[in-house]
Amino acid sequence: MSRAYSRTVELEVPSRRKTSVLPLLAVSVILAAVLAVALVAVTGGATYVIAGLPDPGVVTHYGLGVVRVLADAASVVCVGSLLLASFLVPPQESGTVARDGYAALRTAGIAAWVWFAAAMASVFFTAADGAGKPVTEVFSPVVLLDLIDAIEQPKAWLVTAAIALVVAVGCRLALSWGWATVLFFVSVAGLVPVAVTGHSASGGSHDMATNSLLYHLIAASLWVGGLFALLAHGWRRGDHLTLAATRFSKLALVCWIVMALSGVINALVRIELGDLFTTDYGLLVVAKVVALLVLGVFGQQQRSRGVRSLVDGRGGGQLLRLAAVELLIMFVTLGIATALARTPPPADAVTQPSATEVLIGYDLPGAPTVLRLLFDWRFDLIYGTGALVLAGLYLAGVRRLRRRGDPWPVGRTVSWLAACAVLLIATSSGLGRYSPAMFSAHMGVHMLLSMVAPVLFVLGGPMTLALRALPVAGKDSPPGPREWVLAFVKSPLAKILTHPVVALLLFVGSFYVLYFSGLFDAALNYHWAHLVMNAHFLLTGYIFYWPVIGIDPSPRRLPHLGRLGMMFAAIPFHAFFGVILMSKQTVIGESFYRSLNLPWVTDLLADQRLGGGIAWVSGELPVLLVLIALLVQWARADEREAKRTDRREEQSGDADLAAYNAMLKQMADQGKPQA
């Protein structure tokens, strides 16, 4: 099937157009690599002086910049091509990717193989660079494994290479729109490992720096990669070019805003304002900001003109020419960014942070008090921003319904906003600030994110609101956001996750795996692991409560008795988890908490037992609320069914009863003896 589809695509795509975009990409990558090497030659030598390492030689010093540019370029092409296949061009009615989506999948697959090769090369180069050795000396498996074990960057590149390999194989096998979407999100995840192990992941304020860099990197990849995919789509003379250009133009504006804000935050964390024009690092930051400003203004203006020309029926030539110029500027910016990643911050900005600041990113003012837990906030760029965005999107959907004259229950709105407030408080308040440093505070955040926020989120009915507020694509129109939401609800993945056994194991079983397997001990040292844990708590809680008390349509419609059974099955496991924590005689994460040496935490075991008590007690109230909500929903469902039965009887004039009596009479007559 794949070969036949491939032959069809090759026949339908003109060969001249299909290959003419490749020289532009090659020129852009070479330009970015040359610029990165030149800038590293001017600014990057101080890295070894600051680290106290010998210079590893010319090949390692400059080769690392080249393979980094190649990996970055391949990753953005892969992400952008999968973005096009998933969201910018529509699939066929059968759910299989159309001709344009298939071509984009093949481009993504080639880029993923290049990404994999460059990432594997980066494993060797970053290991040699981190050890101050020539790259030829790390070809030995023993030496390489030792360096990978000791240095974070080679580990990150190894994980990235594994993800790129999965994407490359998946692009070769996938033909459905659903799998193309899955591969898109997997490719975006491949951007994360390297981002969370660079300059931003070390030193003071590394929580803010890492969070802002994640925003910056993902937005840049969507922007650059999406532009390349759009350009390739136009050169292939693909269908739905106007639709793809319009959708990408909206996305590009959002990406530019995110890049601008996150870039400013990341720069302010790493450098003082006075060093912007007096240090190499500061000048690179200024150059990157200027390039982004030029791209933002130039790109948005020119894309809007190009889209108007498409809408007016004047062809896509103007759009493609402008996109080509914008792509070249983008890759110049990519070269600057690569040089920036290879350049150390100014020496006077690299202060000696305290042990607490090194480990969690910031200092704590003292022992946690009620006032500090409530008012000593440190805004979480990931989850704090997510809470505000989710609240804004929900209110926008409610507003659209009310403008249309459609009612929406106030209780659902209150529930959703309360969930957003819980998410904001759990991650950005004083409780969230102390949670990386104290097990008891961490367990409080855990309970809020897994037991309270998900309950309120599912009672808000976000997918029902989206299905009612978003416009229907129409019979002959390409699917849009509403159809994407509906496809997710009906997807095999959603059906698997909401299976009662799977949901129960993810929700309750993960508690035991995380805390009693040593996984939590290993995760404590990394900020990105805290982000993953919080996401896990939220998602597993949502997956569990969605089929139990969710307002939204569920892939698995459980009877109310089955939902009640799921709740009663979870209660003892959750209570037993808290009891184990309170009775445990060894400290979980002991080495990490002792290295913090907080003067107000003199007994780590007592703090852990307090956390176990929080887990045991805090689970009772949410469970009670869920049981009440479930019983109320059950009673309302029975009431609605009774009303429907009454209406049927009124409409039929007791026809069912008459038919039943007739059946009894017939059975009685058949039983009478014949005369």
Image: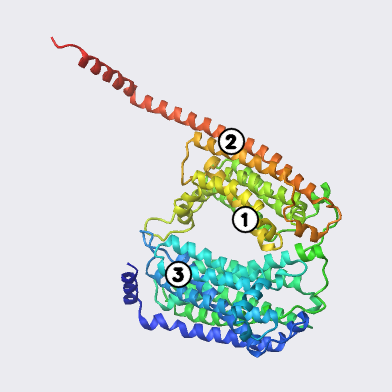
**Vertically, is 172 above or below 543?**
below
**Furthest-left residue in this view:** 675
Identity, as a three-letter code, of the amino acid under mark 1: Ala
**Vertically, is 264 above or below 464?**
below
Circle 2: element type: helix
The mark nearer the N terminus, 2 or 3, is: 3
Q: Which quarter of the rendering shows the C terminus?
A: top left
Circle 3: element type: helix
Identity, as a three-letter code, of the amino acid under mark 3: Val
> Pointer 3: what residue?
169
Identity, as a three-letter code, of the amino acid under mark 2: Ala
Circle 1: element type: helix
> Pointer 2: what residue?
629
Camera-nearest residue between 581 and 83: 581
How far apart marks 1 and 3 lie (CA) works out to: 27 Å
> Pointer 1: what residue?
535
How far apart marks 2 and 3 lie (CA) works out to: 45 Å
